[in-house]
Amino acid sequence: MTDMLYLFLAIALPTVAGTLLVARVTSGSFGPAMRVFLGFGAGMGAVSYLFLIFGFVRVPFSLAPFIAALVIVSAVLSYGLKFSFVAGPCECVHEKSGILWKILSAILVILIIFKLAFVFFEATHRPLYSWDTWTNWSAGAKLFFYEKGLLLDSSGEHFLGKGYRPFLGHPLHATFMQLWGALWLGRFDETLVKLYAPFYFLSMLAVFYYAVKDEAGRKFALVATYLLSAIPILTYHGQEGYADLPLSFYSLAAVICFWKFLSTGKKGLLVMAGTMLGFGVLTKNEGLFYVVAVGFAFIAARFGRTQSKREFLKELACLSLPVVMLAGPWFIAKLAMGLGFGHGLAGSEFNWLSDPLYGSDAPKRVHWEVIGKGLREWMLTANFNLMFPVLAASLILGIKEILRSELKYLYIIIFSVMAMFIFVYLTLEVTTVMDATGIHRNTLTYAPIILFAMTLLASRLFRRSR
């Protein structure tokens, strides 16, 4: 019981700070529930950022400085802030519900609640069991917990977790989340330190539901949220302390904020989108793909369409400066310490056209064989249900609606990210596809965005047909 109280505080304190940040920055663009769930992600991202900064300036890891920082930030953000418990503006059409829909909606709600209960139960009762999770994130978290710091002495045996972290160039958000839980517990409990994972699962479902509801209505939102909750690999990641679920949350949150900016023009939404993108970069290297993709969609949507170039530059600054401020210290550290991005050991570099894990005798060339294997993984495996066949069909049926509406910017983001992943598969990470070791985790990071775009497209086609 005491453990649960401490873990509740570990979630609640950052969530309060994050919710205040969302309320302050987005100024009434979201309702109270949306602010809270976005605030959870923002707050946990802020904790991760504090670990990074405190670690670099060699502040010993203990709860006191983190609690003090969060309380001070919360007090500053709440000063003069008018609290509103009224939902933000909703664009959804009026809906009439018959008895059959009420029965169906009750069933869907029960199924979603059951999925949430299952994920939370498994996360709090099953220890860390994934080799990838332990190797990439948990071993380093346990080391930093007992050493009370990032171990930045370059002459030390375990510099930055070396020996415990095989890929020193990996960002540290998932590691810091487990370290955060361990500090509150006073020990490294290999079950409870990953409690952040089911909360990311819950928050993703919530922000997805409210974002769809605002435009497409409750019916589409409920059905689509159930479909999101039913993605098998998402359920798995909700129980395990891996990094792809948090990256998926931050990417979806950034896209939702960007999407809402397109209809409102509020620059605060761009600031929040940039903040979520920055936290995504601190979660996995692949977070950079979403910075590029959203930036590309922003330029396509706004360049030459704003009132002046000066206005365009202001909007671009609102989107990009949070990314620079959040990710900048980490990249400066990577440059100073000689950390790379590839899947080698410390100081790993890109081995273009060659994946050492694919076999030493593999020819150094573009590996076109990943195309067929990748298509089979997307189309014929169960990790994403029928999402990709439906995506292909929806593009055929809805291409006109996509091109003549702002939906095209969502699809620009989706296909930009997919193109960047495919390029990496062809030239660097061949094993990720050919052994199916990473392609599904990579796809998880943008699958909710695909479902979000397809749901909005379906709602528009449905309304047009009526």
Image (tube, grey):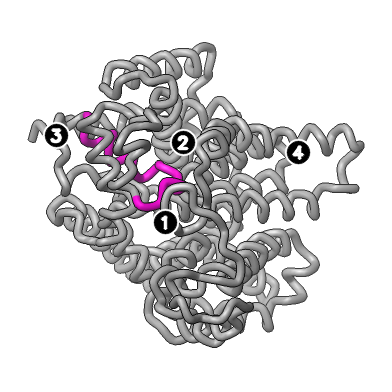
Q: Residues within 10 Å of mark 4 (few under 14, many from 20)?
A: many
Q: Is residue 172 magenta?
A: yes
Q: Which residue is mark 3?
A: 187
Mark closer to the observer (3, 4): 3
Q: CA distance from mark 1 to mark 3?
A: 25 Å
Within 10 angstroms of label 3, few (less than 14), some, or many (20 or more) residues? some
Q: Which quadrant does the C terminus fall into?
A: bottom right
Circle 4 residue: 316
**Residue 40 versus residue 169 in the image, above or below:** above
Residue 452 in the image, given as x and y percentages of width and height: 55, 62
* Residue found at x 46% / y 36%: 42
- Residue found at x 25% / y 61%: 130
Which amino acid type is shown beneath numbered disc 3? Arg
Residue type of the residue flagged with mark 4 = Leu
Where does the magenta region start and end? 166-183
Q: Tag 1's secondary structure?
A: helix
Lower position in the chain sequence, tag 3 or tag 4: 3
Residue at x 48% of width, y 48% of height: 347
Residue 438 on image: x %, y %: 42, 68
Q: Quadrant of residue 69?
A: top left
Q: Residues within 10 Å of mark 1 (few under 14, many from 20)?
A: many
User: Quadrant location of residue 94?
Assistant: bottom right
